[in-house]
Amino acid sequence: MWPLTGSPRPHIPLMSKPPAPRAPSAAVAAFLDQAARVPALRTAPATVARLIFAIDATASRERTWDQAAGLTAEMLQAAQGIGGLAVSLAYYRGFGEFRATPFLKDAADLARRLSGVACLGGKTQIQAVLDHALDETKRERMRALIFIGDAVEEDADALCHIAGELGLRGTQAFIFHEGADPVAGAVFRQIARLSGGAYLPFDSAAIGQLRDLLRAIAVYAAGGQGALARLPGAAARQVAGLLPKPKAGA
């Protein structure tokens, strides 16, 4: 842990093992039962497209946490048919706690790790998420970061600066905003725009639409705009319409 100040942050440890388990929700348990029938996938090789899926796990998001857990694994499965996708699951909660898994291809493994996490009150740590994404894309190009959150309690200029750096390196932030906090919405929109990504609502009442949007982003992360253009459905068209137009000659 580290104090929530402007002082340099120590190296962020990878979550090499799942956290201590808690009883999974019915939704997560159902997914795990389904995933158990699918052959397990190994940890991803370096050639597979990579994506960070980051979630605010503070107390205000407890109501929709299990929904996000199930959607994470389904999103990963959607990309398997076009070369696969490796996902690093990241979350923050409590007093300065930030965790990130290695990049994994096993959807059931991701779901199990999420099911072992309980929400805990604390301040937002969006800068830790963006720093993690920037560190990873410096090592090897990463097309996308997905973040689900409902609040911003940090310096907006600092967050926007890192978002701009991500954009320069080709890593787009797709920000799903839960709730209607106007301050958070304004910052989330700027992060998405500066990174070249997109801002979208996280509507737990429209879970089917949300699932389709996450699948479309996963397909885009795995195969680019060509793969997204071949994906049928309104969600794929919506995501394609939110992305910046490719530059001529790019």
Image (tube, rainbow, N blue to C red):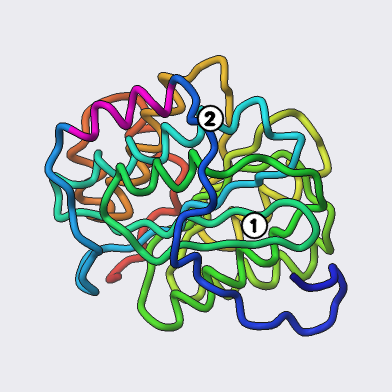
Q: Which residue is mark 1?
A: 191
Which of the image's four quarters has the N terminus? bottom right
Q: Residues within 10 Å of mark 1 (few under 14, many from 20)?
A: many
Residue at image position (23%, 45%) is: 79
Residue at image position (44%, 75%) is: 137
Q: Which residue is mark 2?
A: 66
Q: Is residue 213 left or right of residue 99?
A: left
Q: Amino acid at mark 1?
A: Ile
Residue 241 x %, y %: 41, 39
Magenta: main secondary structure: helix
Residue 52, picture quadrant: bottom left
Check residue 28 for magenta coloring: yes
Above or below residue 46? Residue 85 is above
180 and 22: which is toward the camera:
22
Residue 159 x %, y %: 72, 65
In this view, the mark in front (1 or 2)? 2
Residue at image position (17%, 48%) is: 40
Q: Residue at the top extreme?
A: 205
What residue span does the magenta drawing correspond to? 27-36
Above or below residue 51? Residue 136 is below
Judging from the image, what secondary structure is the residue with disc 1 in? helix
First-in-chain label (1 vs 2):
2
Check residue 87 for magenta coloring: no
100 and 146: which is toward the camera:
100
Residue 3, picture quadrant: bottom right
